């Protein structure tokens, strides 16, 4: 009988330790998602923290272009080309003040077409 109790205690302790480490690992996870963006063939003057150039983007064939104020790590933009790209968005823990709380990283360029994008804002 004593052997069975000891065995169950050992199993319970081992299970608790495994749960503890698993929960620690999950608490450090930062959410990361992938999105497809269409990047317009020209950038636009915009105002973030200061004057800057913004990409014009659409997600999944939206109708209107949106200003995109952040950089996309690994993406080398060339004006005169419209891009479709796959991007990773990862939350930044404790971002600097006046900075984005999301880091954008290029996963791959799906297409790069020399053209003038349509319906751009003036």
Image (cartoon, rainbow, N blue to C red):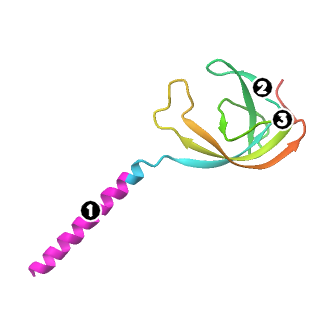
Q: Is the magenta stretch mostly helix, strand or loop?
A: helix
**Residues at marks 1 and 3, CA–CA distance in whole angstroms:** 55 Å
Is residue 98 on the magenta stretch? no
Identify the residue position indicated by label 3 in the image.
41
Asked which quadrant contains residue 18, the reply is bottom left
Mark 1 or mark 3: whose residue is earlier in sequence = 1
Classify mark 3: helix, strand or loop. loop
Q: Nearer the viewer, residue 104 or 75?
A: 75
Question: Which residue is located at x 79 percent, y 39 percent?
Answer: 63
Identify the residue position indicated by label 1 in the image.
16
Classify mark 1: helix, strand or loop. helix
Asked which quadrant contains residue 116, the reply is top right
As displayed, is residue 49 above or below residue 93? Answer: above
10 Å neighbourhood of mark 2: few (<14), some, or many (≥20)? some
Q: Nearer the viewer, residue 109 or 68?
A: 109
Asked which quadrant contains residue 56, the reply is top right
As displayed, is residue 36 above or below residue 14? Answer: above
Classify mark 2: helix, strand or loop. strand
20 sits left or right of 105 in the view: left
């Amino acid at each position: 009988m004593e052997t069975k109790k000891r065995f169950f205690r050992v199993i319970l302790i081992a299970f608790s330790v495994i749960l503890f480490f698993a929960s620690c690992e999950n608490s450090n996870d930062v959410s990361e998602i992938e999105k497809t963006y269409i990047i317009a063939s020209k950038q636009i003057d915009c105002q973030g923290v200061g004057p800057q150039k913004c990409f014009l983007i659409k997600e999944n064939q939206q109708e209107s272009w949106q200003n995109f104020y952040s950089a996309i790590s690994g993406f080398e933009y060339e004006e005169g080309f419209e891009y479709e790209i796959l991007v990773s968005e990862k939350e930044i823990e404790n971002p600097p003040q006046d900075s984005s709380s999301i880091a954008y990283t290029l996963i791959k360029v799906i297409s790069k077409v020399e053209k003038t994008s349509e319906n751009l804002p003036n």
